[in-house]
Amino acid sequence: STVLGTANVMTAAALAEGTTVIESAACEPEIADLAAYLNAMGAKVTGGGTPRVVVEGVRKLHGAEHDIIPDRIEAGTFMVASALTNGEVTLSNCCLDHMLAVVDKLREIGVIVEQADGGAVVASARHLEPTDVTTQPYPGFPTDLQAQLMTLLCMADGNSAITEKIFPDRFMHVAELMRMGANIRKEGPTAIVTGVKGLIGAPVMASDLRASAALVLAGLVARDQTTVHRVYHIDRGYERIEQKLRSLGADIQRRAE
C-alpha cells in the first residue's frame, strides 16, 4: 500500500464519474483524516483508514472547515529528543492513539510516556535498554521514525537490531552517525546498533528529511559542536524545528551555507 497513492486516487475519485474501489489502501490516520475532509466537502468516501476504500463520484465539492490531525512523526521525533537528553517534554495536541507502536517501543527502551490532557508527557529513564524493531505499514512502527530511533539506540546499553521493511535502502544516515562515533553495522535490510558511551560532534551531511532529524537529535547529545549540512531537507517535515528545540533548552541555531 502507498499513502500518497491512496490519497491521490481517493481525491481524484471524489469527482470522477461512477464508483471507485481502492483495494490494499493505506490505513494510516492521515488517510482517514483526508476521507473525513473530503466528506465534509460533499464527497462520498467510505472505508477511509481501512484496506478497502470506496468512493462514489459526485458532481462538485463545496468549501468546508477541517482541523487537521496532529503530526505523529513530529511528535515521535520530540519524544526521542526528550529521551536522548534525559529531559521531560509536554507535547500538546498529540494523539497517542495514532502512535501506539511508537509508544510501546519507547516504553520498552525505558522512556516514560504518559497521557496528558490533549497530549502527552515524555521523560526518560536514565538507563536505555536495547531493543529490536522492524518498520511496518500502519499500525506498525513507522519507517519515518526509523532514523530517529536509531539515534536513540546509539545510546542504549547493548545491541539493537533495526530492520527496514518499507524502504530497505533507507540507511543513508548510518555513515553520518558513525562519523559521530556511533557503532553500527549493516546486514542487508538490518542495522545492528551497539550502544556507545557518547557521541562526538562532527560535520555531517543530511541526505533526506528523516536523516536530517536523526542527525539534529544526535547533535543534541554529542560532545562538542555538530554541524548538519544540507539541513534544508528538514523543512519538508518540520516547522521551525530549531526554534522549538531552542525553546526547550537546546543550544541550536540555523546558519546560511
Image (tube, helix red, strand yellow):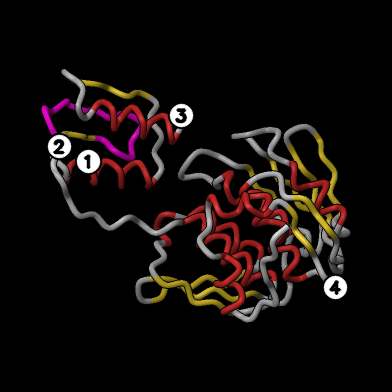
Q: CA distance from mark 4 to mark 3?
A: 43 Å
Kind of residue at badge 3: Ser
Question: Percent position (x, y) of residue 170?
Answer: 68, 38
Judge from the rendering whether residue 61 lies leftward or rightward of residue 136; answer left or right: left
Residue positioned 86% across, 52% down in the render:
178
Question: Percent position (x, y) of residue 186?
Answer: 82, 39
Q: Disc 4 designates what residue?
A: 224
Q: Is residue 45 above or below residue 66?
A: above
Q: Are marks 2 and 3 in contact (CB under 8 Å)?
A: no
Kind of residue at badge 2: Leu
The residue range painted magenta reads 47-60
Of the numbered discs 3 and 1, the one sitting upstream in the chain is: 3
Of badges 3 and 1, nearer the viewer stands 1
Of badges 2 and 3, nearer the viewer stands 2
Q: Disc 2 designates what residue?
A: 61
Q: Disc 1 designates what residue?
A: 38
Q: Is residue 4 above or below residue 240?
A: above
By secondary structure, the bulk of the magenta-drawn segment is best described as loop
Residue positioned 32% across, 24% down in the render:
22
Say which of 213 and 20 sits in front: 213
Q: Are marks 2 and 1 in contact (CB under 8 Å)?
A: yes
Give the SS element for disc 1. Answer: helix
Say which of 211 and 142 sits in front: 211
Give the SS element for disc 3. Answer: loop
**Residue 165, quarter of picture:** top right
Q: Disc 3 designates what residue?
A: 1
Q: Residues within 10 Å of mark 1 (few under 14, many from 20)?
A: many
Q: Are marks 2 and 4 in contact (CB under 8 Å)?
A: no
